[in-house]
Image (cartoon, rainbow, N blue to C red):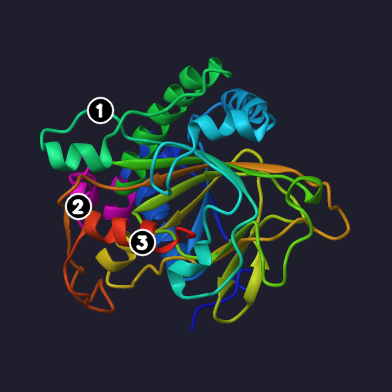
Amino acid sequence: MRTSVSDAPVPTIDLRPWLAGGEEARAALARTVDQALQTAGFLLVTGHGVEPELRAAIRRAAREFFLLPDEVKRRYEAKVGGRGWLGPGAEANGYAEGTETPPDLKESLTFATDEPFEDPVVNAEWYAPNVWPAEVPGLRGLCRTYLSRMAALEKELLSLLGYALGLRPDFFSRHMDRPTYGFNINWYPGTDVVGAPLPGQFRIGPHTDFGTVTVLDRQAGKGGLQVYTDAGGWEDAPYDPAALTINIGDLLSRWTGDRWRSGRHRVLPPPVEAPAEELMSLVYFGECTPGTLVESVPAPVGRVTYPPVDSHVYLREKLDSITVG
């Protein structure tokens, strides 16, 4: 049985020993990572090298966009998994696990991989050009800088995760030659913008992520992130302003044969005691190169053997499942 967050504190790990430490320090870090992903299911990570000033600048620029009139934002409207603006009511993340919830109480700016791929069919679906709002010209450069940091961090994390399983450090990262990714800037305004929540409505409904690793830069709030464990149920996720929150997604969980379970989580609605609370999250969804065949690692590392799956067939099905309408 998985232990609760309160029984198994989520560790804050410093990446610097992995990046520049000796073998003993790296092995100790790997043991901590493996244990945490078997129990709490996610980590807080420092030593990641992503400056707080960059994260703050992205939030300021994105907020300028979100405060624009809806008729302006609609010029950039996109479908789930596309590039542009996802307005109110576009997503219901609970649908992915079969939970019937009202649409999520958020807006998003969403960007993704846009460097051309050699296969024109794959290129059309997964590498379309990003759409950058002309009204906030500084956002493009900020996000490009941030995403280059995220891509490098994702590769280091996947190398650490391969090592933590006793496999080759490139066991996962070698599937990152031409990876796709998704990047959402999620805006969670207060009830003055979204109205009073409906019964069972969340800023983001209960779900698991779909890809390899998710790298989340979030803000603390009463209507913030919660994680679910079998023993503890729903609990507030721990927060450290210097740390990034890391959790694994469905594809990596399948890859490890459920040794590491994809963490179920949700974002609470605006709180009754603070209805004007406004939060913003920067969410990087790591993926792999299109066409990667994800096969479960056998025992004794893996616990369950899943049928092999094409990574991007799986991702497309999941993205379609959370689309409202």
Residue in front for this viewpoint, 272 or 260:
272
Q: Earlier in the sequence, mark 2 or mark 1?
A: 1
Residue located beneath label 2 in the image: 171
- Relative to 51, 194 lies left or right: right
Disc assigned to residue 318 = 3
The disc labelled 2 sits on which kind of residue?
Phe
Membership of 219 in magenta stretch: no
Label 2 residue SS = helix
Magenta residue span: 159-177
Residue located beneath label 1 in the image: 115
Membership of 166 in magenta stretch: yes
Return the x and y of residue 299 as percentages of the image width and height: 20, 76
- Relative to 296, 93 lies left or right: right
Q: Residue furthest bottom?
A: 1
Residue for point 84% across, 52% down = 275
What distance separates the C-alpha of mark 2 from that of mark 1?
Answer: 24 Å
Return the x and y of residue 278 as percentages of the image width and height: 75, 43
Classify 10 Å Cα crowding around label 3: few (below 14), some (14-19), many (20 and above). Answer: some
What distance separates the C-alpha of mark 2 from that of mark 3?
Answer: 24 Å
Label 1 residue SS = loop
Is residue 178 visible from the viewing direction of this image? no
Q: Is residue 204 above or below residue 131?
A: below
